[in-house]
Image: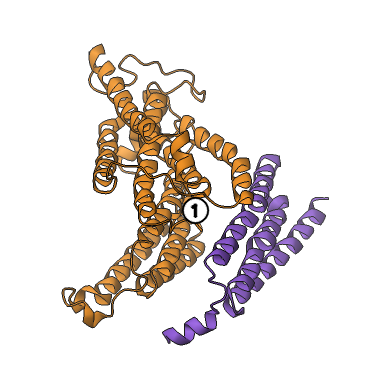
C-alpha cells in the first residue's frame, strides 16, 4: 500500500473541504465539494474498495452536484452577512465547521496510521472472505454481504429511498405538469444521442454483473438516473416526460420494491425463511457466469429499478418547480 | 520496441501536463468568460487526452490500453459538447458583456 500517495490525497481532500466550507459563493462551494467527492473516490479505489469508489464517484460528483445546482438556482447567490442573521449564533458558523474539518483530518490520518501497521482480520471478515463463494455462489464479496447475508438491511435502505421520493414528490409536485423547456442546442442534442447508448450499456453492465464485478443495483440504478437527468437537461423536460412518463417511473419503482419482496417471500414460502438464498428455492449456478449466486441477480435488478426510478423522479420533481416559475433554467 | 514506446508515452504525458498547467494559468489570468472557456477546454482536450495516450504503453496489455483509448474518445466527444453548451448559455444570458473585472470591482 502506498501511504505517501494516500497522505497526498488526504491533504487535498482536506483542502477542498475547507475551501467548500469557507467560500462565500455557493456555486464555488458546490464545485469544491464535487472535487472532494472525486478525490474520495480515488482514495477508495486506492484502498481497494471499488464498490464504494463507484458509488462515491456517481453519487457525489454526478447526482448530488446536479441536485444541489437545481436547489441553488432557487436561492440567493451569496449568504447574508452574519449580522443580518440573528437566529444563527456565532459558534454555529465557522468554528463548528472548522471543528468538523479538524475531526475529519484526525480520523483520516488515524486510518493512515493503522493502515501502516500489521492488520489481522476479525472473525466475521475472515469468515466472509473464506466462505462466500460456497455459501452464496457470488464472486463479489461485497454484493454477497449486501444481498445475501444482510439482505434485510438492503430492503430497509431501499425503503429509505422510497420515503425520500414520496416526501419530495409530495412537497414539490403540485399535481400539474407544464410543457416547457426546449433544451440545449442542436450540437449538444446530437452528441448526447451519440453517447446515450454507451452510457446505458455501461449502466446495464454494472447492474447485471453486480454479483461478479464491483458494482450492483445501487450503482447501476444511479447511472440510469444520471442518463434520465442528462436527457432532462439536454432535451428539455417535456421530451423526457414524453419518453419516460412519471407514471412509468412510479410503476418501475413500485415494481422494484415488489420484486424484492416477492423474492424474499418465495424463500419464506419454501420454508427456509424470508430472503433465503441458496438454502431456499434458488440455485448456485456455475461461479463466474451471469446466472449464479441464486437470487442476487433478481435482487440487483430490484434495487436498480428502485434507485434509478426514484432518483430520476426526485430530479424531475425539483426541475419541474423551476420551470413553473418562468423558463429560467433553459438557456 | 517497448522502451521506445514508453519514451514516446513519457513525452506525451509531459505535453499533457504542460497543457493542463497552461489551462489553469488561462482560467486564472484571462479577462472574460469566452477566453477563459477557450483556455479551460485545453485542460481536457489537450491535457487529459495526451496524458491518456501517454499512459497507453504503461497499461500492461491490450485490455487496459483499449479502455484508455475509449476514455480518450469519450473525452473528445463530450468535452467540446460541454464547452459549446456553456458558451451558448453565456451568450444567451449576455454574461459575456459584463466583464469579470468589473464584477470583481463591485464585490471587493
In the rendered view, tell whether residue B90 sits above or below residue B1: below
**Left or right: where does residue B47 sit relative to residue A278?**
right
Please identify the quarter of the rendering in which residue A298 is found: top left
Residue shown at 49% from the left, 19% from the top? A286
Q: Subunit of mark 1?
A: A
Residue shown at 47% from the left, 20% from the top? A291
Q: Nearer the viewer, residue A36 or A222?
A: A222
Say which colour chain A has: orange
**Left or right: where does residue A131 sit relative to residue B70?**
left
Which chain wears purple? B
Give percent across and percent down for residue A106: 32, 67
Please identify the quarter of the rendering in which residue B90 is found: bottom right
Query: Could you classify mark 1 by the number of other residues whose Cα lies within 10 Å: few (under 14), some (14-19), or many (20 or more)?
Result: some
**Left or right: where does residue A268 sit relative to residue A2?**
left
Residue at the spot of label 1: A46
Give percent across and percent down for residue B71: 63, 48
Q: Nearer the viewer, residue A265 or A137?
A: A265
Please identify the quarter of the rendering in which residue B37 is found: bottom right
Give percent across and percent down for residue A124: 30, 38
Q: Secondary structure at mark 1?
A: helix
Q: Nearer the viewer, residue A109 or B97?
A: B97
Q: Quadrant of the C terminus of chain B?
A: bottom left
Give percent across and percent down for residue B40: 62, 67
Q: Nearer the viewer, residue A37 or A163?
A: A163
Tell me, yes or no, if residue A131 can be seen here: no
Residue shown at 29% from the left, 20% from the top? A262
**Left or right: where does residue B18 sit relative to residue A112?**
right
Question: Looking at the image, what colour scheme do you see?
Answer: by chain
Amino acid at each position: 500500500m502506498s501511504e505517501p500517495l494516500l497522505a497526498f490525497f488526504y491533504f487535498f481532500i482536506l483542502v477542498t473541504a475547507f475551501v467548500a466550507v469557507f467560500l462565500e459563493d455557493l456555486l464555488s462551494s458546490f464545485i469544491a465539494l464535487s472535487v472532494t467527492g472525486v478525490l474520495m473516490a480515488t482514495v477508495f479505489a486506492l484502498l481497494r474498495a471499488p464498490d464504494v469508489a463507484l458509488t462515491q464517484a456517481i453519487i457525489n460528483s454526478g447526482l448530488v452536484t446536479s441536485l444541489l445546482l437545481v436547489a441553488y438556482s432557487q436561492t440567493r447567490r451569496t449568504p447574508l452577512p452574519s449580522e443580518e442573521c440573528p437566529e444563527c449564533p456565532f459558534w454555529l458558523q465557522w468554528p463548528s465547521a472548522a471543528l468538523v474539518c479538524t475531526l475529519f483530518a484526525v480520523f483520516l490520518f488515524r486510518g493512515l496510521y493503522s493502515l501502516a501497521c500489521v492488520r489481522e482480520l476479525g472473525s466475521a471478515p475472515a469468515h466472509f472472505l473464506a466462505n462466500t463463494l460456497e455459501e452464496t455462489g457470488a464472486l463479489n464479496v461485497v454484493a454477497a454481504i449486501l444481498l445475501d447475508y444482510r439482505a434485510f438491511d438492503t430492503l430497509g435502505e431501499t425503503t429509505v429511498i422510497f420515503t425520500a421520493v414520496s416526501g419530495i414528490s409530495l412537497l414539490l409536485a403540485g399535481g400539474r405538469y407544464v410543457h416547457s423547456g426546449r433544451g440545449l442546442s442542436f450540437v449538444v442534442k446530437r452528441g448526447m444521442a451519440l453517447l446515450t447508448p454507451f452510457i446505458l450499456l455501461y449502466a446495464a453492465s454494472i447492474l447485471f454483473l453486480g454479483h461478479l464485478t464491483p458494482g450492483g443495483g445501487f450503482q447501476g440504478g444511479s447511472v440510469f438516473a444520471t442518463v434520465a437527468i442528462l436527457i432532462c437537461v439536454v432535451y428539455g423536460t417535456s421530451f423526457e416526460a414524453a419518453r419516460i412518463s412519471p407514471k412509468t417511473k412510479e410503476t418501475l419503482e413500485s415494481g422494484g420494491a415488489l420484486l424484492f419482496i416477492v423474492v424474499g417471500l418465495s424463500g419464506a414460502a419454501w420454508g427456509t425463511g424470508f430472503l433465503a438464498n441458496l438454502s431456499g428455492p434458488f440455485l448456485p449456478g456455475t461461479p463466474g457466469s451471469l446466472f449464479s449466486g441464486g437470487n442476487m441477480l433478481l435482487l440487483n435488478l430490484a434495487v436498480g429499478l428502485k434507485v434509478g426510478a426514484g432518483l430520476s423522479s426526485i430530479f424531475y420533481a425539483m426541475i419541474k418547480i423551476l420551470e413553473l416559475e418562468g423558463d429560467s433554467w433553459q438557456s | 520496441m517497448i522502451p521506445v514506446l514508453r519514451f514516446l508515452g513519457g513525452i506525451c504525458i509531459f505535453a499533457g501536463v504542460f497543457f493542463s498547467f497552461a489551462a489553469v494559468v488561462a482560467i486564472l489570468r484571462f479577462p472574460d468568460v469566452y477566453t477563459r472557456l477557450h483556455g479551460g477546454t485545453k485542460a481536457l482536450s489537450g491535457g487529459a487526452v495526451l496524458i491518456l495516450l501517454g499512459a497507453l504503453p504503461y497499461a500492461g496489455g491490450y485490455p487496459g490500453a483499449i479502455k484508455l483509448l475509449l476514455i480518450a474518445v469519450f473525452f473528445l466527444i463530450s468535452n467540446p459538447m460541454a464547452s459549446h453548451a456553456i458558451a451558448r448559455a453565456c451568450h444567451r444570458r449576455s454574461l459575456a458583456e459584463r466583464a469579470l473585472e468589473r464584477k470583481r470591482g463591485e464585490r471587493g
